[in-house]
Amino acid sequence: MSGASVLFDAPGPRARVRNHIISAVTVVVVALVVWVVYTRLSAKGQLTAAKWEPFLTADLWTTYVLPGIEGTLTAAAVSIVLALALGLLLGVGRLSTHTGIRWVSSVIVEFFRAVPVLIMMIFAYFLYAFYDVFPSKYLALAGVITGLTLYNGAVIAEIVRAGVHAVPRGQGEAAAALGLTSGQTMRSILLPQAVTSMLPVLVSQLVVVLKDTAIGYQITFVEMVRQGTVVGSSYGNYIPALIVIALLMISANFALSSFATWLDRRMRKSRRGGSPLEPGAVEQEGAPGAKVV
């Protein structure tokens, strides 16, 4: 094995030539695909300057794009707050020493993790409409928030449980030796330290909440992706409209992802509490009482 690498043997002359040929072929194929897509779009007139001109007018932004941005951010913000509260409640419930509370919390978590988000949104939408729970103009928003809250609350509950398990066992044993109850240990010892472990993964889950608001278009919720298709239908510029919406969504998600990366790096430098959880730390097999690693 080559001294330059402990993972693989350094390629010989033939292997280097083969790798260069494969790389060149790959570049040519990708360039060819890009060229074909470009020529097809250009032939349809989707890349002409006239298709982009509507985005230079204030009317398009105030009528279509800004309401979509407002809907997406509103649903995401409310869902995040409610999901955090629900996830904390269910996560602590799954760690409870009372069998009944632990069993009920486990059933709720596993059920809402198993049901697709869209199904929950549709069910909540028609349930609220049937019983006239919300005014008609808020039905779609309520349905989206309900679906996102229930699903992400269940996921956050597992993040909380994994974060508490990441705290060194000696912390709980020391609290028990001091005579603290399980509730006092959880509130005063385990949860404060677990925050340092679960925060980066928690922020990453918030990115999922933001992206999943796009599913709400199925129940006529006004969000960015839906508004992008409306712009494309109104102005006949689907490709430019979807490109603009994609850039807006990417910008929002990139901001959250950057914050999560910065927070993860900061938490790794701070050695308080358990080690920060990796995104795959929450076991997804879904059996009530399943071990979280």
Image (cartoon, grey):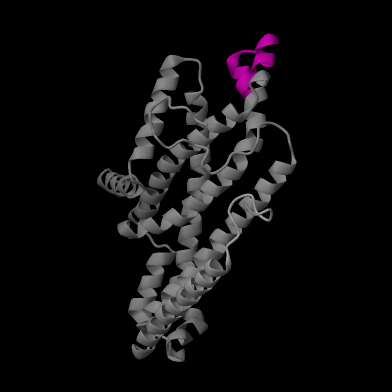
240 lies above or below 283: below
Of 162 and 178, the residue lying toward us:
162
Farthest left residue in view: 130
| Residue 259 place in picture, x, y as percent | 64, 53
Q: Residue at x 65, y 25 (%)?
A: 168
The magenta span reads: 172-187
Of 22 and 209, the residue lying toward us:
22
228 lies above or below 136: below
Tell me how many marks there are: 0
| Residue 222 place in picture, x, y as percent | 39, 62
3 lies above or below 272: below
Magenta span main SS: helix
Q: Residue at x 65, y 12 (%)?
A: 176
Q: Is residue 229 visible?
A: yes
Is 178 magenta? The answer is: yes
195 lies above or below 20: above
Q: Is residue 132 left or right of residue 83?
A: left
Q: Is residue 63 visible?
A: no
Of 60 and 284, the residue lying toward us:
284
Q: To which quarter of the image does residue 270 belong?
A: top right
Is 262 magenta? The answer is: no
| Residue 192 place in picture, x, y as percent | 66, 30
| Residue 255 place in picture, x, y as percent | 60, 59
